[in-house]
Image (cartoon, coloured by chain):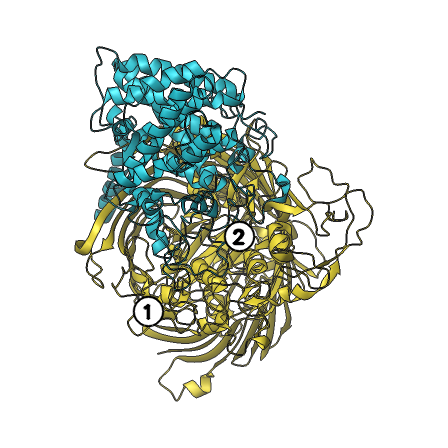
Chain colours: A cyan, B yellow
């Protein structure tokens, strides 16, 4: 009987221990993640992801504008195959979603400085999204209730972007803010003036996109340019970190990987030939700040690009073809800055907008754009002068055309998604520009205008996904 | 409760009185006898002896004797029933005042007719008393399968159960019972594993990145310790286990000591294995492109023929890079005891080398169990310590890199003298990644230390009442270490790691505690009506903690340590789950002919919102032994009908009810941590999901049990599933956790057993299991067309699996040939329609994804034969898996790389069979080569294989049906007369071959191949670990 008593005691105790504690089951709060995020944490991640998204988009669009070419023959992005850029798509949406949470938090907190900063980034990320994919979900997006958001017309989204920028300009100048960004802002470290100028810079960029349309407002573009960056020191860029591979500048990582034979970052012959004198008979001094010459016996000292779609052919994996070089300006090291919008770009926008109304202003802006970009890269002053003094560059204000502006801007926008917007506005009319080898036959020999919608949308939001091809265009890209 | 017990006492009393009154006044005699085993002449204890016409019954005593006194004179039928023996019947006459003696000799039943099966919570019940299907596997079957783990032993042995095993030392296997019943792509569709009543962890924690084939945790169990395995396939069988056994349960009973002399058993096993099935590789064309040779670097085999490049040599790198696998198993166990205490102790070691270089896996298991019987108290305890682990190889990468590898380079020559990697260039320098180098240098080791223990005690208050308590623990640590060395700093060195080398340490600590208390009551309500009732409480508590630390970019070469790493990051994942259940299990039998079982269970779970955390579900099953109710013909020995209905509830994964923000692993950066919204939209109002299951069946035995047929029809529907529905990223998220959808499995299971020969010296027993399961996704959620299970990367277009209403779980989706007259809205291909040929003369690809295959088999069957001749035993076992499609990624890759004989048509000119867009027959001849066709001058670019073939998923989906000689084995045991002169109790030597014969149309390594244990992507075989065949020699002897 003594066993029985003990056994009973243990059993009964264990039951009551379990049933008795009513909170025994209350353990479903996730111990791994918080249910809310500090506004600083959101600012940190959204600034970081804004730079990352720039890299993600440019990793694709740089092939379309033929800054890059694949070392492999018939590589799908290089030949405009229907590729699902689902990761880029998702990250753009995730970042905009986080920014909207940040804006809500800032409103609750009474922190217009946070809200203004976030709105500039919304305008920027949304621009990347629309210009890569065209019509996309926005007004019904970012909701826990609407799981299949409808697609908005890209022109309407441009109106929204304009709204965000207008609100941002006002909020960034608010005299009071319960909290303001500081070190949590990886882009400007809380410099509200710089953010305001970025808002105007983005406005200038987006308004300039209307160049093919009747509603193109040159005066508004010029006015926005005037309020944007006053020098390259204010460029919208983020310097990366030397704290592990995923915090490094991604272009540096591409270059380093390539040097370790994980091939990538190879330059297109279109781009290299413009810089090495092949196309224009003039060597652009910036070439040394972007790539390195061949070291193989046969081609030593030459800069050789790779034909898009053709792959490297018999060329070796290293030492012959021009690639994004480790240590060059864009891949100078782990902490290299990643450029998103620059003073040089503003000058080319100014040149383009002023071209038909004020030739002198346009020419001055054209010159300033070239000089600004060269200085940014660190080109010697004498080399800048020599380049500018070449007659094919300093054509004179009377002879300046859109071709010179776009030719120069093409170099200045290296590794910037904006380069593809320029190329489409300019209808890829760069001298010597060719359709890639092994080009996707579905495009009938025409250059890509928008990428395909990602597979995830076809699978999860099929009812709303517009039926279009890669030759259909974003609203501003109409003839 | 007390009231009902009192009631049943009362009724028993009443019955007895009636009987006593009824029997008075007649002339009487007595009946006595002894019951023995026909074979051994041992007395049988506890045999049920019944004088049918009088409703008199008793059990034989410790000497196998029985005696009825005061039996009314007359002629009666005497019946003896004993578990594991054929029923015995005899006419007897009792004369007044005389003592009739009947000695009964009982024959052991060959077909385990009235045997005992282990049911939920380890309760042993007579098979005839069960109203649902239950199938078991004995230790003999485990031994003869030669398998080194539990799942291998189950393969083909149980209907409705699909076990797939991959090659590879330590690589996990998968088991699915009666199809898939969750729409959650990440759901574990595998059953609950229970050892001696204690649920154990059978999860597979796959490695980060490309899978390395980690073990499923039931592999830790030493198969030599197993007495029997019982498989509960449906909700009626598992209802008592509740939420955790919603996919069925595998109950493992371990060997226990028996009273008597101490016994010692040794078992020794040696095995060798190699690849079962190789694609046909071509050695005609060398590396390069467009028929021109490029001998350096990763060039596909589209170059000049080897015959034109005498300086190049073809290497069959697939064959050369793999080795012969070796396994050595040793185990010893000691058992014995007295009438009051028994013990069982075992030590075993299993040492395995896989066929891929540097892949090995060891397991050491030490187990001790004992039982103590002290009057009404029984206490049993067992503890099992296991150490397992080995080095794992990224097999998908390995196979992929073999495909990339230039066939003119020897892959087994993998290292330069300075220790750096040799690539596939002639000088060995370059970027071609050598898979053998990767396997040897970049290591991933796991080391699992695990203890599974339990204490079981029961107290018998009275014949009819007992209390049982069981507490069990399963706890393990899994220490993993991944090292990819950094650069050696030498000139021209190829550096494998893009981050300068790294070390990643993973620590998993998991602990499951199960407590189960139950009260059992047995009572005969009347002479005819028996009842057992079990009520109990069940508590489950799981806690796991995963910590991962990673150090990148080593400063000093060859010093792979955190202190030498430049960048360090870490990560942690804590999980806790608790469950409380209260259950009741009532069994009522009438005259041992009709059995009714009703259960109910209520669960309270920690993972659902407070208001919805409690849920109840019932089950009812009925079995009727028709052959004992009706007059049946002589040849029908036994017939039972059964039917059951059950519901099972299921809770959510932990932490599904509240949305969170996540700090991505890149942080902190400069001391700052960033946050982003979690990718899942949580639901604060989740409800339990519910599976209802219905089953009917019969069990027939003919010709004195020499033929048996067991058939089950079932249907199970899971509704309101808690699933992460994928949503448009435009929501700012990727998934939404909600109750949605319905999935149905219905099928037929047939087990046929026969003993065609049953003689003294020669027996032949045959068992066949047949399974047919149909799976259909009934619905998902309004507005959600599909749930993506996942995809694997292939060239150009990726095949994927998605769940779409109206289709099977196993549907494979992808691009297909465009067909003339096809309905553009149909998801299903109509392959009878002609293929459309484009203006270029090549088939046109339909980019609109269609269902191009179904990876759930139409039917499966196993036939197993066991022959015994004197002391020889011989068995063979054949598996049939029919009507199953799988995507063969190797086929797709070879269209890119030109490695297989299938691509030898590259210089052919053909007219593709099909029609042009206008419906007219295609007549255009095209060349299948690359570049400019010398005859026509037409430039074919990258050629047919790369431009057309590799873009069409349909083309690489193959019939993966197979017939496998699963195992064939011969054993010889020393006979009694030889053993008499030897110090052994028994000696057996055996040889078994596994998977040695294979028929399949599937052209990859193994039609059974799968990605990794725990993956539901059953139809998309990546470049899987090649399947193996093995030869096993075994020796067992005991003292």
- Which label lies toward us, 1 or 2? 2
Residue in the foreground of this view, choosing between B435 and A59: A59
B307 lies above or below B471: below
**Quadrant occupied by the N terminus of chain B:** top left
Residue in the foreground of this view, choosing between A275 and B777: A275
Binning the other alpha carbons within 10 Å of mark 2 as few (below 14), some (14 to 19) or many (20 upward) gives many
Label 1 – label 2 distance at C-alpha: 60 Å
Left-right relation of B745 to B495: right
Left-right relation of B806 to B793: right
**Quadrant occupied by the C terminus of chain B:** bottom left
Please provide percent x and percent y for residue B488. 25, 64
Binning the other alpha carbons within 10 Å of mark 1 as few (below 14), some (14 to 19) or many (20 upward) gives many
Q: Picture quarter containing residue B489?
A: bottom left
Write down the chain letter for disc 1.
B
Q: Which mark is residue B348?
A: 1
Check disc 2 and report its element: helix, strand or loop.
loop
A111 lies above or below B409: above
Q: Which mark is residue A310?
A: 2
- Viewer can see residue B760: no
Left-right relation of B80 to B929: left
Please provide percent x and percent y for residue B62. 40, 64
Q: In this rendering, do the residues under marks 1 and 2 share a single chain?
A: no
Check disc 1 and report its element: helix, strand or loop.
strand
Left-right relation of B959 to B384: right
Residue in the foreground of this view, choosing between B698 and B520: B698
Q: Measuring 32% from the left and 39% from the top, which residue is drawn there?
A: A386
B364 lies above or below B267: above
């Amino acid at each position: 009987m003594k066993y029985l008593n003990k056994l009973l005691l243990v059993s009964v105790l264990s039951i009551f221990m379990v049933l008795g504690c009513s909170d025994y089951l209350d353990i479903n709060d996730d111990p791994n993640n918080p249910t809310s995020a500090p506004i600083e944490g959101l600012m940190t991640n959204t600034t970081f992801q804004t730079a990352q998204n720039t890299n993600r988009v440019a990793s694709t669009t740089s092939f379309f504008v033929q800054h890059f070419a694949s070392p492999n023959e018939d590589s799908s992005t290089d030949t405009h195959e229907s590729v699902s850029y689902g990761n880029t798509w998702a990250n753009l949406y995730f970042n905009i979603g986080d920014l909207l949470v940040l804006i809500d938090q800032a409103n609750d907190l009474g922190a217009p400085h946070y809200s203004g900063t976030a709105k500039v980034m919304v305008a920027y990320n949304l621009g990347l999204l629309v210009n890569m994919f065209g019509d996309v979900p926005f007004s019904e997006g970012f909701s826990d209730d609407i799981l299949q958001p409808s697609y908005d017309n890209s022109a309407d989204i441009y109106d929204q972007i304009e709204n965000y920028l207008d609100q941002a300009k006002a909020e960034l100048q608010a005299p009071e803010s319960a909290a303001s960004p500081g070190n949590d802002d990886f882009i400007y470290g809380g410099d509200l003036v710089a953010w305001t100028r970025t808002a105007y810079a983005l406005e200038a960029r987006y308004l300039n996109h209307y160049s093919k349309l009747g509603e193109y407002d040159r005066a508004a573009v010029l006015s926005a340019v005037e309020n944007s960056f006053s020098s390259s020191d204010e460029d919208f860029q983020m310097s990366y970190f030397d704290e592990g591979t995923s915090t490094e500048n991604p272009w540096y990582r591409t270059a380093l990987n390539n040097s370790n034979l994980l091939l990538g970052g190879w330059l297109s012959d279109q781009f290299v030939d413009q810089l090495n004198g092949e196309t224009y008979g003039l060597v652009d001094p910036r070439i040394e700040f972007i790539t390195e010459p061949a070291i193989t016996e046969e081609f030593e000292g030459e800069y050789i690009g790779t034909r898009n779609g053709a792959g490297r052919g018999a060329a070796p994996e290293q030492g012959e073809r021009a690639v994004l070089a480790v240590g060059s300006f864009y891949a100078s090291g782990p902490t290299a800055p990643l450029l998103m919008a620059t003073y040089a770009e503003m000058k080319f926008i100014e040149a383009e907008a002023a071209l038909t109304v004020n030739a002198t202003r346009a020419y001055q802006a054209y010159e300033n754009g070239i000089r600004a970009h060269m200085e940014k890269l660190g080109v010697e002053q004498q080399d800048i002068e020599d380049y500018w003094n070449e007659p094919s560059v300093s054509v004179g204000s009377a002879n300046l055309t859109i071709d010179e502006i776009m030719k120069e801007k093409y170099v200045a926008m290296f590794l910037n998604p904006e380069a593809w917007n320029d190329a489409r506005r300019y209808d890829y009319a760069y001298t010597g520009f060719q359709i890639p080898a092994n080009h996707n036959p579905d495009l009938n020999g025409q250059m890509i205008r928008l990428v395909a919608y990602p597979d995830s949308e076809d699978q999860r939001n099929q009812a709303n996904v517009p039926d279009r091809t890669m030759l259909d265009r974003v609203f501003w890209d109409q003839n | 409760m007390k009231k009902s017990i009192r009631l049943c006492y009362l009724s028993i009393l009443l019955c007895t009185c009636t009987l006593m009154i009824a029997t008075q006044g007649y002339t009487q005699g007595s009946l006595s006898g002894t019951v023995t085993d026909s074979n051994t002449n041992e007395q049988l204890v506890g045999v049920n002896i019944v004088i049918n016409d009088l409703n008199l019954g008793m059990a034989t005593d410790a000497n196998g004797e029985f005696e009825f006194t005061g039996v009314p004179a007359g002629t009666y039928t005497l019946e003896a029933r004993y578990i594991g023996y054929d029923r015995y019947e005899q006419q007897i006459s009792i004369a007044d005042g005389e003592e009739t003696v009947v000695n009964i000799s009982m024959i052991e039943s060959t077909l385990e007719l009235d045997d005992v099966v282990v049911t939920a919570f380890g309760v042993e019940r007579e098979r005839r008393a069960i109203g649902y299907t239950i199938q078991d596997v004995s230790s003999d079957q485990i031994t003869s399968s030669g398998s080194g783990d539990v799942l291998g032993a189950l393969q083909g042995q149980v209907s409705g159960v699909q076990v797939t095993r991959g090659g590879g030392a330590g690589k996990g296997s998968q088991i699915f019972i009666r199809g898939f019943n969750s729409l959650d792509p990440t759901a574990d569709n595998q059953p609950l594993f229970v050892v001696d009543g204690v649920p154990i962890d059978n999860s597979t924690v796959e490695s980060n990145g490309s899978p390395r084939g980690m073990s499923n945790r039931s592999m830790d169990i030493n198969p030599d310790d197993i007495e029997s395995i019982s498989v509960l396939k449906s909700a009626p069988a598992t209802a008592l286990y509740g939420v955790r056994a919603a996919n069925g349960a595998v109950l493992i009973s371990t060997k226990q000591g028996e009273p008597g002399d101490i016994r010692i058993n040794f078992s020794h096993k040696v095995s060798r294995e190699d690849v079962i099935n190789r694609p046909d590789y071509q050695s005609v064309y060398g590396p390069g492109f467009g028929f021109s040779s490029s001998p350096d670097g990763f060039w596909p085999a589209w170059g000049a023929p080897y015959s034109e490049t005498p300086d190049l040599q073809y290497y069959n790198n697939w064959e050369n890079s793999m080795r012969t696998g070796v396994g050595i198993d040793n185990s010893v166990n000691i058992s014995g005891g007295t009438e009051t205490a028994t013990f069982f102790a075992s030590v075993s070691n299993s040492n395995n080398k896989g066929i891929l270089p540097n892949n090995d896996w060891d397991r050491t298991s030490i187990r001790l169990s004992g039982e103590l019987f002290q009057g009404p108290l029984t206490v049993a305890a067992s503890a099992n310590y296991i150490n397992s682990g080995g080095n794992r190889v990224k097999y998908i990468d390995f196979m992929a890199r073999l495909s990339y590898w230039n066939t003119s380079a020897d892959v087994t020559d993998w290292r330069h003298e300075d220790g750096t990697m040799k690539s596939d260039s002639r000088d060995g320098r370059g970027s071609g990644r050598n898979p053998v180098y990767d396997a040897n240098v970049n290591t991933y080791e796991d080391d699992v230390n695990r203890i599974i223990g339990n204490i079981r005690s029961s107290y018998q208050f009275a014949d009819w009442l007992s209390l049982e308590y069981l507490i069990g623990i399963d706890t393990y640590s899994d220490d993993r270490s991944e090292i990819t060395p950094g650069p050696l700093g030498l000139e021209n060195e190829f550096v494998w790691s893009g981050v300068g080398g790294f070390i990643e340490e993973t620590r998993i600590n998991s602990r499951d505690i199960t407590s189960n208390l139950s009260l059992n009551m047995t009572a005969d309500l009347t002479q005819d009506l028996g009842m057992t009732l079990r009520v109990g409480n069940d508590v489950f508590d799981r806690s796991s903690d995963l910590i991962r630390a990673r150090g990148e970019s080593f400063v000093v070469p060859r010093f792979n340590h955190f202190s030498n790493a430049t960048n360090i990051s870490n990560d942690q994942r804590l999980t806790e789950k608790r469950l409380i259940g209260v259950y009741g299990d009532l069994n009522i039998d009438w005259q041992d002919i009709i059995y009714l079982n009703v259960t109910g269970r209520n669960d309270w779970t920690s993972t659902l919102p407070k208001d919805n955390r409690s849920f109840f579900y019932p089950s009812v099953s009925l079995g009727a032994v028709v052959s004992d109710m009706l007059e049946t013909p002589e040849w029908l020995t036994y017939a039972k009908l059964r039917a059951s209905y059950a519901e099972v509830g299921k809770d959510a994964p932990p932490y599904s009810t509240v949305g969170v923000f996540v700090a991505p692993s890149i942080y902190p950066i400069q001391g700052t941590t960033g946050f982003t919204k979690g990718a899942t939209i949580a639901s604060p109002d989740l409800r339990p999901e519910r599976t209802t299951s219905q089953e009917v069946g019969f069990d027939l035995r003919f010709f004195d049990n020499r033929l048996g047929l067991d058939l089950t029809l079932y249907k199970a529907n899971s509704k309101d599933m808690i699933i992460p529905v994928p949503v448009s990223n435009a929501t700012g998220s990727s998934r939404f956790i909600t109750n949605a959808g319905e999935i149905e499995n219905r099928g037929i299971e047939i087990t046929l057993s026969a003993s065609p020969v049953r003689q003294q010296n020669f027996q032949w027993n045959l068992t066949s299991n047949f399974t047919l399961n149909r799976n259909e996704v009934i619905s998902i959620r309004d507005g959600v067309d599909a749930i993506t299970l996942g995809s694997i990367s292939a060239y150009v277009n990726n095949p994927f699996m998605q769940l779409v209403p109206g289709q099977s779980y196993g549907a494979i989706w992808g691009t297909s040939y465009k067909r003339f007259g096809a309905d553009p809205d149909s998801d299903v291909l109509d392959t009878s329609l002609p293929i459309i040929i484009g203006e270029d003369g090549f088939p046109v690809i339909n980019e609109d994804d269609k269902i191009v295959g179904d990876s759930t088999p139409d039917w499966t069957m196993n036939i197993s034969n066991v022959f015994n001749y004197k002391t020889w035993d011989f068995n063979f076992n054949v598996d049939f898996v029919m009507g199953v499609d799988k995507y063969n990624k190797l086929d797709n890759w070879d269209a890119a790389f030109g490695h297989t004989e299938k691509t030898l048509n590259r210089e052919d000119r053909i007219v593709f069979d099909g029609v042009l867009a206008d419906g007219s027959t295609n007549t255009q001849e095209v060349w299948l080569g690359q570049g400019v066709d010398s005859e026509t001058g037409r430039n074919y670019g990258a050629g047919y294989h790369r431009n057309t073939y590799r873009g069409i998923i349909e083309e690489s989906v193959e019939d993966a049906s197979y017939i496998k000689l699963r195992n064939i084995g011969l054993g010889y045991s020393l006979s009694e007369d030889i053993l008499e002169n030897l110090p052994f109790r028994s000696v057996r030597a055996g040889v078994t071959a596994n998977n040695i014969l294979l028929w399949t149309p599937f052209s990859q390594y193994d039609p059974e191949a799968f990605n990794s244990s725990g993956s539901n992507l059953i139809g998309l075989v990546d470049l899987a670990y090649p399947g193996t065949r093995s030869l096993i020699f075994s020796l067992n002897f005991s003292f």
